[in-house]
Image: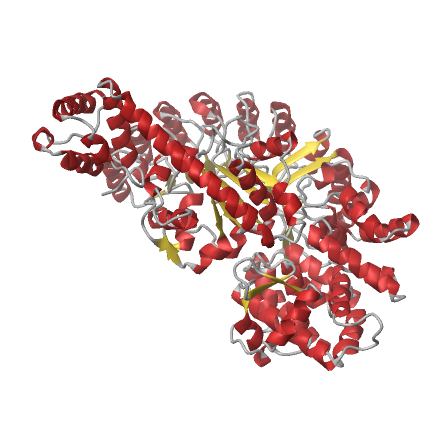
Amino acid sequence: MASFFSDFGLMWYLEELNKKEFIKFKEFLKQEILQSKLKQISWTEVKKASREDLANLLLKHYEEKQAWDTTFRIFQKMNRKDLVERAGREIAGHSKFYQAHLKKKLTHDYARKFNIQVQHFFKQKFTQGDCEHFENLLISKATGKKPHTVFLQGAAGIGKSLMLTKLMLAWSQGVVFQNKFSYIFYFCCQDVKKLKRTSLAELISKEWPNASAPVAEILSQPEKLLLIIDSLEVMECDMSERDSELCDNCTEKQPVSVLLSSLLRRKMLPESSLLVSATPETFEKMEDRVECTNVKIITGFNESSIKTYFRSLFQDRNRTQEIFSLVRENAQLFTVCQVPVLCWMVATCLKKEIEKGRDPVSICRRTTSVYTSHIFSLFLPQSARSPSKKSQEQLQGLCSLATEGVWTDTSVFSKEALRRNGIMDSDIPTLLEIRILGKSKESENSYVFLHPSIQEACAAIFYLLKSHVDHPSRDVKSVETLMFTFLKKVKVQWIFLGCFIFGLLHESEQKKLVAFFGYQMSREVKHQLYQCLETISDSAELQEQIDGMKLFYCLFEMEDEAFLVQAMSCVEQINFVAKNYSDVVVAAYCLKHCSTLKKLCFSTQNVLSEELSYREKLLLCWHHMCSVLISSKDIHILQVKDTNLNETAFLVLYNHLKYPSCTLKVLVVNNVTFLCDNHLFFELIQNQRLQHLNLSLTFLSHSDVKLLCDVLNQAECNIEKLMLANCSLSEQCWDYLSEVLRRNKTLSHLDISSNDLKDEGLKVLCGALTLPDSALISLRLEACELTGACCEDLASTFTHCKTLWGINLLENALDHSGLVVLFEALKQQTCTLHVLGLRITDFDKETQEFLIAEEEKNPYLSILSSV
């Protein structure tokens, strides 16, 4: 029988009642069922039930929490508050017991997980600022309430796990979340993934200090439960399961990917709170499938922290400034330094190379150069000119191990895996000492690379030394397969891998490889990359799948202008998101060499609206990015999405779009904010070649719509398709659009879905559509808050508009009587409508039967879920 506490079940509490009280309990239960409108239980069964039988009846007919809530309410009415208070003490007791256990575990068992001065960290007192920071992680600024799902988004190694551990330690010490959470459970996805199949109850039991975890009690108050899911990128789950595949039973074993999807998509324990850490790539892949209340960006070291770290290594102030400036000028390398362990790597690498008399400028040339300099220097003593044979074998073994890991999604390696790749047990102390490997927290005999990006750099080196067919693992694929996997972001946890492959083909990196190993295979690899480009060039579908930013970074690392021009001539369409200054620099570097582009889709998010110290450099790069609109003579489609443009940035874009050779036919502007006077933007629409304008998701004021409609009403305007879905259009806008429908003879497709059109607004539009010379062919009115009252106006449009072919009415509150009016109009000979967007399952059974019958009667009509 399910139990609420580990030692005390529902039956135990009923046995505390004497005979008279037990009879009285049954009478109160009968009243409670009626008053609370609970599911009925046979009174005959209740009347003859023993205490054990009644406990079973309650748990059988009601969910466990409801059974207990009902029992406690009856105890209150019977004046047996002592039993309710005892239950409260039991709950509090288990929570305090678990808190004490977690504090001990964090202090002792987790200490060796982090490469820091552990005793200081775990014994320090949390400041008020620390506590406020932790509390704010779980507070939504929008509502001020505790949110259900919060994502901690940050690069690998940036410190997400450390922050989560500190948060749990603060809770275990009683300084945060004391009135919010009775329990906090931490699940590391590296551990969860190994289980293959499990249940949430089993995961919780594994975290409990003994074998008898009070799972039912823990789950009975999900609103008092915080589940922490760390390193979600390890799972490679994309949350694509159908709703029917998800599970709401916490005790039922499921594949771990289904279990996590059920939690993240709120099928399981929807009242609980979730704190999830993942890399930006993982979050980007699933953000449209997971409803998160808040996203917190973990940025690691800021500029001041990075500078302080460099100052601690380079005692000379002038030398510090010189080296720091080199790193600061390389936008990508500076971003790398935000990760604490990588900041250490970059700083110590530069210090060593300078001490050897090498030029720091050449080392900071590209990110690949810093990684290879660091890795090779670890295996080359300060005084040695060339590596020993042993060092060569050790690094080759590491590169082989790293390659196996990236293909098998492995970051924690056993001694057996090391041996399989040529690393002997006797090599391990050396590899630990030079800090390219570290001990894993999972066991004494498992090992990890210092950082995932160092593992990727070693894997890239493998491909410059050997063919994939020479690898001991059959999981390892060819360079071509690697590049397509990287560019298509099939493995979102790969951050630099493809870039390192390209970077190693630079002349200076080839010299390093030859100096260390005596040989390299750059010609073979370069030929394979040429073949990749040819494959991309021949496939429009493949170009659609490729992440443009990944391709840009690969070409940027290679720093080969001839190869860059050839690569850019292979793509006719490209899609990318520039999230920071570094991304804009790299995109500009590539796009200014592009001449064959036909379709460009990009987002710069907030980069071009922020006040940055390197503003002039950023605008120069933005100018180079926009120059592709002129250099590519046949560019016909431009999509700008999720972007904020200040006045200066907009003017740069405006001037390039106004250039005589710019031949745009399709302009898509989705969720874009212009921090300037909008009239210039609407001037662009006067371009006589422009045929398709999509402003969906972009806020338009009524004055914006007036400017737009003024342009659309001009005789030279050739726009055929206008999309204004979800633009927050106001009541004043319908008159402007109605005038367009009256006067414009080229506009044939209009989408105003997800705006508050309402019946009154539709009446205004229908007045224009019923005119004999209306040119509209399709009209999308999805989710426009329409009711059955609008059907008379629609019916009139159906019979008078001689061009209207399709209309979408999904997600509106149309009723049966209104639909009858519509279908009467559809029977008229003057009606030209052939496609009607309605979801039949949205209606009651009678209306469904009516719609099916009407569609069967009219051979020219199709009722679709969407049009």
Residue 160, above or below 823: below
In front here: 171 or 484? 171
Please give left or right for residue 801 compared with residue 47 in the image.
right
Image position, residue 319 (x, y; %): 90, 52
Assign the C terminus to one quadrant of the image.
Answer: top left
Q: Quarter of the image holding residue 700?
A: top right
Could you tell me which residue is drawn at 71 percent across and 30 percent down?
679
How many numbered dots are placed on residues in this image?
Answer: 0
Most foreground residue, 561 or 770: 561
Picture residue at 84% right of the left edge, 64% below the top: 353
Indicate the colouring scheme. Answer: secondary structure
Residue 761 at x, y percent in the picture: 47, 23
List x then y, in percent, for residue 137: 57, 35
Above or below, 464 relative to 197: below
- Residue at figure coordinates x 58%, y 48% from the top left: 161
Q: Residue at x 82, y 39 (%)?
A: 613
Residue 640 visible at all: no
The answer to whether residue 2 is above or below residue 731 is below
Q: Considering only vertical position in the picture, is 737 above or below 334?
A: above
Q: Nearer the viewer, residue 262 or 689?
A: 262
User: Taking the image as drawn, is residue 209 in sight?
Assistant: yes
Q: Position of residue 462 (x, y in %)?
A: 65, 73
| Left or right, 825 with reference to 338 | left
User: In the rendered view of the protein, which quadrant contains the N terminus?
Assistant: top left
